[in-house]
Amino acid sequence: MLQTMPNHIVHIIAFMICCRLFSIEIFHETKATFFNCHFTKGKLIYYFSIDNINTSLSVVNSNMTITINPAIKVINLQKKFGNIKAVDDVSFEIEEGSIVGILGPNGAGKTTTIRLITGIFQLGSSSQVQIFSNDLTNSPKLLKKKFGIVPEISNAYSDLTVWQNLRFSGTIYGLSNKEITTRAEILLKRFELQDKTHAKTKTLSKGLKQRLNLCLALLHEPPILILDEPMTGLDPFSVNIVRNQILEFKRENKTILITTHNMQEAERVCDRILIMNKGKIIADETPELLLKKIKPASTMVFTLKNDLSYEQNTELNSLFPLMEQKAYQISIVSNTPFKDIMKLGDFLEKNKLSILDFKLQESTLEEVFIHLIKNDIKGGINNVQA
């Protein structure tokens, strides 16, 4: 039917359907920006923006599909330092308005990945990073405006006050005095820093500095936030503020990429988790699916009455390679919990050891993480065997 109509009629009908579908007000408060359209391979493609969401509309005969383009698309990311592959052929996409966490041990390649994405490190010839479907590699100023970055080490100037840091940052991004003042006041209130406006940064606690870092990252209103270990070393009050604001950013349709060692926080805020080890992504799933798909699904947790000798510790490690010990408490991730309980009982009896308590629980995200890293799984969670 559409093929028999004049092109301009097809354009109008398709665009009106799209506006109807998304409840766009065309004549009053326009919420859609129409970019372009073309006919290719039997598809009529429209490109437009809805409330800053980059979207394409495809019409094939009388069928229509909507595709939301990713905020970040990483293709064949690689980085070597000498003979060491810090990032080894990494590819992934991040949907707009989502929170994605990158987890991994020290040296896994998390920070290097972020530096490649944000343009701090130069990309190799075979690597590509697309931001809202655009390759901004050769547009560093535009790339910089797309990101709000909170590094692990504060980038605020210690001898400047909170307000002076905000003003300086706003000036760098080309904001007017009025824009800086208006936005800074909103952010200071949002992060409960109003009473610290004239305090020098070096006098602030780590939690307050981190809140200032978030203010600095948000001042130019970027669509993407990159947070490197945002909650490390923070007091519980600051953790709560930062966590709540991260979730609020998501509601505002900001895209957030977090690196963290904090499994509990990742599980609480992330829509998706990438686990890295030795420069590769070894798992990419939602927290829920990671817990469901990864086997083992159980963890034995018990507390010893006495400490283990070196020989006993070595023997227990050989029996249970996925063992973690914190003082007298031992956690063992198990594929076959009931069989392993019997094996543990034999070990305790043989070595005349007593335990104060014992529980069998479902594996947490932290235990899944340990399981993946210790087994050095290649190619993601689908290769994990029971």
Image (cartoon, grey):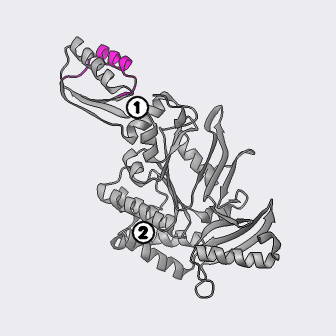
Residue at (64%, 50%) from the top-left corner?
Answer: 74
The numbered dot on residue 296 is 1
349 and 124: which is toward the camera: 349
Residue 202 shows in the view: no
Q: Which segment is the magenta one?
A: 306-323
- The quarter of the displayed image where residue 361 is located: top left
Amino acid type shown at disc 1: Pro
Mark 2 → mark 1, Cα distance in angstroms: 48 Å
In the displayed structure, 368 sits above or below 174; it is above
SS for tag 1? Answer: loop
Residue 342 location in percent, x, y?
Answer: 28, 19
SS for tag 2? Answer: helix
Residue 60 shows in the view: yes
Whether 320 is among the magenta residues is: yes
Amino acid type shown at disc 2: Val
The numbered dot on residue 4 is none
Q: Quadrant of the N terminus?
A: bottom right
The answer to whether residue 83 is left or right of residue 3 is left
Q: Which of labels 2 and 1 is toward the front?
A: 1
What residue is shown with label 2?
Answer: 162
Q: Earlier in the sequence, mark 2 or mark 1?
A: 2
